[in-house]
Image (tube, rainbow, N blue to C red):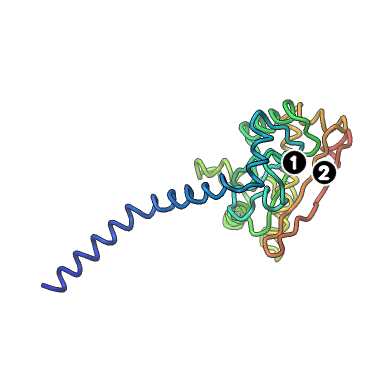
Amino acid sequence: MKKTIASITLCIQTVFTCITSPMNEWNSLLEANKKFIKNNSLVKQRRVLKNGQNPSVIILSCSDSRVPPELIFNQKLGSLFVVRIAGGVVDDVVTDSIEFAVRTFDVRLIVVLGHSDCGAVAGALKHLQKNGGIVDKSRKHLNAVLIPIEKAIIEEGIDVHGVHALEQSIQSNVKYVANQLLSRSKTISDVCKAGHVILVGAEYLLNTGQVKQLFSSAAADIQQKL
């Protein structure tokens, strides 16, 4: 009888934990927000920004929780216009978001930021290894992230079974994404060609925290140079 009661109690506790844990996460965020609200330095920053923003830098980066641009570059509120998406890939939403910022703010720099140990790139590389270096189009919604990365790897001619395949693929994806922004958007291409905006490709190294520049260009033939 005692064992039965103990089992029932354990089941109830397990169910209760499953129900409350997600809300605990939310409550934890709300508590952290209270600290954010009371931070005097941030209070001053919010006061300056309450009527608008004018970031001079756009950063396109991966959604990976370990790669927050605002922290990596030690920036204040309002300094960066950040677009984050798995693998840092380009679609219409990403392109339109960056175009909006270019047209609206005094943007001087666009950074395409990849990072070491990228899960999206690793996933794309794994599929190419499995499928003999051929793009697999049967994965439905996953195609939106993986296929562009797979195309980047194939275009660069990377040996998908090579020792340095992942690092090479990460860097080739950054280059591919930068060229996609230029080819998909006349707005972005024009400001880069005119030298009003510089486009930089970079990689964030998880083990050291360093950002390594891969390329930089504002030339009229920027797409060829990348």
Q: Is residue 45 above or below residue 122?
A: above
Q: Is residue 52 above or below residue 57?
A: above
Q: Residue furthest left?
A: 1
Total labels: the figure holds 2
What is the C-alpha distance between the residues marked 1 and 2?
Answer: 8 Å
Left or right of 17: which side holds 205?
right
Q: Mark 1 = which residue? A: 178
Q: Decide which of tag 1 and tag 2 comes sooner along the chain.
A: 1
Amino acid type of the residue that numbered disc 1 sits on in the rendered structure: Ala
Q: Residues within 10 Å of mark 2 (few under 14, many from 20)?
A: some
Residue 157 shows up from this direction: no
What secondary structure is found at the residue carrying circle 1? helix
What secondary structure is found at the residue carrying circle 2? loop
Q: Residue at x 76, y 34 (%)?
A: 182
Q: Do callouts 1 and 2 mark residues in contact (Cβ within 8 Å)?
A: yes
Q: Mark 2 = which residue? A: 226
Q: Which image quarter holds the N terminus?
A: bottom left
| Horizontal and vertical percent position of residue 170 | 69, 53
Amino acid type of the residue that numbered disc 2 sits on in the rendered structure: Leu
**Residue in the foreground of this view, choosing between 162 and 118:** 118
**Residue in the foreground of this view, choosing between 12 and 45:** 45
| Horizontal and vertical percent position of residue 11 | 24, 62
**Residue in the foreground of this view, choosing between 179 and 27:** 27
Q: Residue furthest bottom?
A: 2
Q: Residue at x 70, y 63 (%)?
A: 162
- In terms of image quadrants, where is residue 127? bottom right
Q: Residues within 10 Å of mark 1 (few under 14, many from 20)?
A: many
- In terms of image quadrants, where is residue 143? top right
Q: Which image quarter holds the C terminus?
A: top right
